[in-house]
């Protein structure tokens, strides 16, 4: 069943007007009619099942016929810190990270970052927010991940309970337990920040800066992953450790 985020309190009736994006998708793309149903998420994470009672070219009236809560979010808040990527690889990454349960995605330029988004940042933010919302609706999540663009210094100083940095040298040295230990130890509801380097990896200076901010180095196995793949590997591991273990 289709799910939409209203981000406001939901009363007994939902009214969608023609200038609303949900009206356009539900009414025109999905061709809703009287009796059609969809789920709507309120700003307090309540899920409301609604049924169309009236629809025309200007308005859709929806009656709420059921209310319920369903906890589908990860038990910890995960922030992924990544470098801007070339082409449309970031689109795919945001979609998949959202499906896997990320809470926040931070894009920041690193020493070896190749892509330069400074002139396109405003357009990128709008596009990425739409991608994240669509993916959150498809995955039947309760929240849409926040997409942030910020500086490297702001990034490494952001508040956290636990910080991890994916570092290929750790894997080469045989380290294999840091990710499991750190993820397992984060208290429920607290924040885990994971940093991933660009193509070419993080520099030694960046690693040292992260160490000084209490980030722990962690290997992600013996294989080298692409910049957009490594965070998804970590998200999958987090899900297994905190939801399926």
Image (cartoon, rainbow, N blue to C red):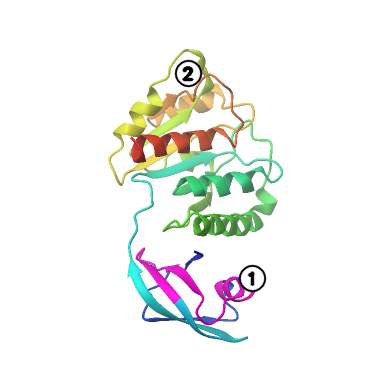
Whether residue 6 is visible here, answered yes or no, is no
Task: Quadrant for residue 244, please give it.
Answer: top left
Q: Is residue 95 left or right of residue 209?
A: right
At x 52%, y 45%, the residue is: 97
Q: Which mark is residue 29?
A: 1
The reply to whether callout 1 and callout 2 are in contact (CB within 8 Å) is no
Circle count: 2
As drawn, the residue found furthest toward the front would be 35
Residues drawn in magenta: 22-50
Q: Is residue 180 left or right of residue 6?
A: left
Residue toward you, 52 or 71: 52
Q: Earlier in the sequence, mark 1 or mark 2?
A: 1
Task: Quadrant for residue 90, please give it.
Answer: top right
At x 68%, y 43%, the residue is: 116
Whether residue 60 is visible here, answered yes or no, is yes
SS label for mark 2: helix
Q: Is residue 148 above or below residue 213?
A: below
At x 39%, y 77%, the residue is: 64
Mark 1 crowdedness (10 Å alpha carbons): few <14, some 14-19, many ≥20:
few
Please give the residue where the numbered disc 2 appears in the rendered image.
170
Q: Quadrant of the C terminus?
A: top left
Relative image position of residue 75 (x, y in whole percent): 33, 45
Q: Is residue 34 magenta?
A: yes
Task: Quadrant for residue 240, please give it.
Answer: top left
At x 29%, y 33%, the residue is: 185
Residue toward you, 214 or 195: 195
Which one is in front in this view, the residue at disc 1 or the one at disc 2?
Answer: 1
């Amino acid at each position: 069943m289709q799910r939409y985020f209203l981000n406001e309190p939901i009363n007994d009736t939902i009214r969608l007007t023609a200038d609303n994006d949900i009206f356009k998708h539900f009414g025109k793309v999905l061709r809703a009619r009287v009796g059609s149903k969809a789920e709507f998420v309120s700003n307090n994470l309540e899920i409301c099942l609604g049924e169309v009672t009236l629809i025309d070219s200007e308005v859709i009236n929806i009656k709420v016929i059921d209310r319920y809560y369903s906890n589908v979010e990860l038990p910890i808040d995960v922030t992924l810190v990544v470098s801007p990527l070339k082409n449309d690889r970031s689109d795919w990454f945001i979609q998949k990270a959202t499906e896997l349960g990320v809470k926040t995605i931070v894009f920041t330029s690193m020493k070896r970052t190749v892509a330069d988004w400074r002139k396109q940042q405003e357009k990128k933010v709008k596009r990425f927010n739409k991608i994240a919302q669509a993916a959150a609706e498809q995955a039947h999540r309760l929240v849409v991940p926040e997409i942030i663009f910020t500086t490297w210094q702001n990034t490494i100083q952001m508040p956290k309970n636990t910080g991890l940095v994916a570092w290929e040298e750790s894997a080469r040295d045989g380290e294999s337990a840091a990710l499991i230990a750190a993820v397992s130890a984060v208290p429920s509801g607290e924040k885990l920040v994971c940093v991933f380097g660009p193509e070419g990896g993080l520099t030694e200076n960046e690693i040292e800066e992260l160490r000084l901010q209490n980030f722990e180095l962690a290997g992600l196995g013996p294989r080298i992953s692409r910049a957009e793949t490594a965070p998804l590997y970590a998200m999958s591991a987090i899900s297994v450790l905190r939801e399926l273990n």
